[in-house]
Image (spheres, rainbow, N blue to C red):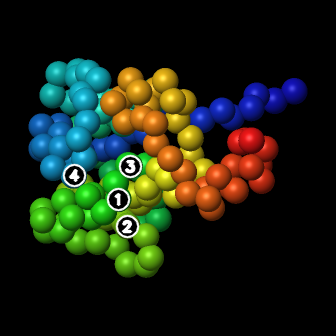
Amino acid sequence: MTARAIGINHVALEVGDIDEALEFYGRIVSFSLRGRVGDHMAFIDLGDQFLALSAPRSSPPDEHRHFGLVVDDKAAVKAALEADGVPLGGGSGLSFRDPWGNQMDVVQYDEVQFVKDERVLRGMGAGPLPKTDAAREELRAKGLAG
């Protein structure tokens, strides 16, 4: 018997400086700081998940590793990135690299099959959030929605 993967608790990113990283991400998205360990770790709260920032960066960025960040307003993120002068990646999606080379793909909650429990969304001050017909169909096709 093997364990079933249920989800992701957190993603850890290496950054050059914690304070600079918190300032950078705070210009892109609003967040609550879950906690901090001195000047080398910070945890950005994502409700029942979190983004861990670790400094200093010890390895160079690579070309393919990235993670997808789910937001409630992708257009607002794009506008914030453009206002901050952050180069956007090519293609049809919204992707960018932070100042330390971490690549992020930004997706909008209503357009993807990712679902947060409504209690978590309410606790984050973000819920309820609707889903597009296409996202609901993806969930139904997997037996994850009625």
Q: Secondary structure at mark 1?
A: helix
Give amino acid for label 3: Val
Check disc 1 and report the residue beneath it: 74
Q: Residue at x 43, y 49 (%)?
A: 70
Say whether marks 1 and 4 touch (CB < 8 Å). Answer: no
Q: Earlier in the sequence, mark 1 or mark 4?
A: 4
Q: Which residue is mark 4?
A: 28
User: Which label's residue is closer to the chain start, 1 or 2?
Assistant: 1
Q: Which residue is mark 3?
A: 71
Q: Are marks 1 and 3 in contact (CB under 8 Å)?
A: yes
Of mark 2 and mark 4, the one earlier in the sequence is 4
Can see residue 60? Answer: no
Sequence order check, earlier mark of 4 and 3: 4
**Could you classify mark 3 by the number of other residues whose Cα lies within 10 Å: few (under 14), some (14-19), or many (20 or more)?**
some
Q: Position of residue 122 (x, y in %)?
A: 41, 27
> As rendered, which of 56 and 101 lies closer to the eye?
101
Tag 2: Cα neighbours inside 10 Å, few (<14), some, or many (≥20)? some
**As drawn, 16 above or below 128:** below
- Label 4 neighbourhood size at 10 Å, few (<14), some (14-19), many (20+)? some
Looking at the image, which is closer to me, 88 or 111? 111
Q: Is residue 84 left or right of residue 136?
A: left
Q: Which label belongs to residue 94?
A: 2
Of circles 1 and 4, which is in front? 1
